[in-house]
Every structure is written in C-alpha cells, then in structure tokens.
Image (cartoon, grey):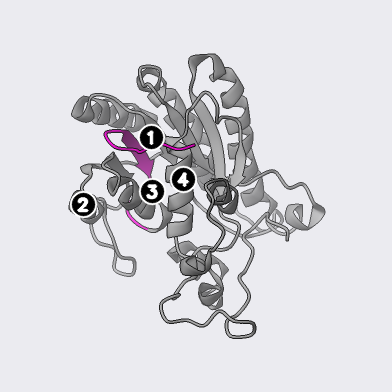
Amino acid sequence: MSTSLKGRTIFITGASRGIGRQIALTAAGQGANLVIAAKSETPHPKLPGTIHTVAEEVRARGGGALALKLDVRDDAAVVEAMKVAADAFGGIDAVVANAGAIRLEPAATLEMKRFDLIHAVNVRALLALAKAALPYLEASSNPHILSMSPPLNLQPHWLKPHIPYTVTKYAMTLLCLGMAEEFRDKGIAVNALWPRTTIATSAVMFEVGAHYMERSRTPQIVADAACLLLARPARAWTGGTWLDEDILRQDGRVDFDSYRNGADGRDFTAGAAPDLALDLFVDA
C-alpha cells in the first residue's frame, strides 16, 4: 500500500519540537528532504529544540535538511519560504501543517486577541500554506497536504468546554475536506490526521496537565502514521479524516504498547499502568 519517502521534499511547520520534529526525523530515516519551518531559531529557556538542532538531527538520520525561521501568520514569509525550499531541493512534494496554537478556555472568558492568534496559527495558516505550495505541488508526482486536525465530532460535550479552540481545529478539517475536492483533479491529496490518545508534548504538559504525560503516547505514533499516509498514492488517498491508529492498522500494525510514553521497561499487564487518555474530540 505504501512506498518510501526517499528523495521526497516535505515542508513541515512547527517542526522544531514535538510531533513536527518526530515526523521530520522519521521521514529523514527514509531518505526524505525536510524543510524545518518554525519560529524557534534560538533556544527557549524552558523548551528544548530549535530549527537548527532538528536540522542537524535530520542530517544524522540520512535526510536532507533546510532550517527556515517562519511565522505562519506572515503571508509573504510563507510564500518566500516555499520558494526558498523549492529552490533548495528542486520542488516540494508534501506540506504538513503542524504548527498550532491552543487555549482551552470557554467563549465567555477567552480574550478576542487570543482567539485571533489561535485562528491565525491554526485555520488561516493552513490555507496560506496550501495556496503558497500549490504551484510546487502541482509539479510533484505524488503531492500531499496534511493537516494536524481532528475528525469532526459534533457531540455537545466537545462543543461546550472550549469552543473557540474547537472551532479552529474543526475549521482546519473542513478546509481539508473542501480542498481535497477542489484539488482532486490536480491529483493533490489533502488529509487530516489526529492522535487517538494524548501525546507527550510540551503542549499537553502546559495546557492539559503534567499528570497526563504518563497516560500519553509518544509523538512517534503520529509520525509513523503521517509518513505512511504521505507515502501513499495521492490520487487514491485524499479527503480523509484519520486517527493515527487507523493508518497504522491499515498497514498491519496492531501492537501499540511501544508507543506509550516511558514504555522502556514498563509492564503493561492489566492494572500495571494507567489507562491511556483519549485525545480531544475522540470518544471511545
């Protein structure tokens, strides 16, 4: 079902840490060229990783790397970054819209300037990236756009608690579904991917709570699913809203214990480890 990413050029936003970084490293292991696009050009006092450290890791894994400082809210910068990336590697084959902003706060109390930020980084950036990449994707033999956004779940218990954030993530998925149809004749796949469980990242640590870390999986599970999806034939695999487990099961993988955060040396027999926490917008 899948082929290798060898020689493919993948542009990833928010790639200096977390899920974006792991997608870059996993694709690099297959010989892909990675454009590491993020704001983190210099070290953060509390968070590890910059675009430059990830680029070094990518090269160590056997991939090509280009580190680009990018604010996805800047349209001109997005257009220029795509051009620089295409010039460096001779084209662009895939775009992963991974950069995201989160604030789990209800509508009554969220400040509008915070909503503007979340909307700009999540929804608007996806559209800006897709538009800027379109000329290069049209020239690719297997072009993909991948959004890190969830299947649409309109159950009231997901609409009530933090609808400003929720609506931006759902809007990303709606953009994917619409662009999948708009770009279908061009042979460009557009899909949304989301983790079934919480993922051990700094976003979970600071926004959801440190106690979720031991109930989470590592970013590797999302990275493995993303790379499998990006390697599939674009014309046959478009317009999907996937959970990471969906993609892995289609590839014949059914044992996910190794993806648990801190899995090394852990006993996963009944009662030996806390239950995994389902991610936002996912019901059992």
Circle nearer the N terminus (3, 1): 3
Q: Is residue 66 left or right of residue 100?
A: left
Residue 104's x, y, as percent? 61, 60
Q: CA distance from mark 3 to mark 4?
A: 15 Å
Circle nearer the N terminus (4, 2): 2
Residue 176's x, y, as percent? 58, 32
Question: For the residue marked with disc 3, what is the amino acid?
Answer: Gly
Residue 222's x, y, as percent? 48, 53
Nearest to viewer (mark 1 / mark 4): 4
Neighbour class for label 2 at 10 Å: few (<14), some, many (≥20)? many
Given residues 112 and 127, the one toward you in this image is: 127
Q: Residue at x 51, y 40 (%)?
A: 147
Q: CA distance from mark 4 to mark 2?
A: 22 Å
Q: Which residue has dot 4 on it?
A: 226
Circle nearer the N terminus (1, 2): 2
Q: Which residues are magenta?
A: 1-17
| Quarter residue 82 falls in | top left
Element assignment for label 3: loop
Q: How many marks?
A: 4
**Residue 260, numbered circle:** none
Is 25 rendered above or below residue 260?
Answer: above
Question: For the residue marked with disc 2, what is the amino acid?
Answer: His
Neighbour class for label 4 at 10 Å: few (<14), some, many (≥20)? many
Nearest to viewer (mark 3 / mark 4): 4
Element assignment for label 2: helix
Q: CA distance from mark 2 to mark 3?
A: 13 Å
Queried whether the magenta region covers residue 2, the answer comes back as yes
Element assignment for label 1: loop
Q: Which residue has dot 3 on it?
A: 14
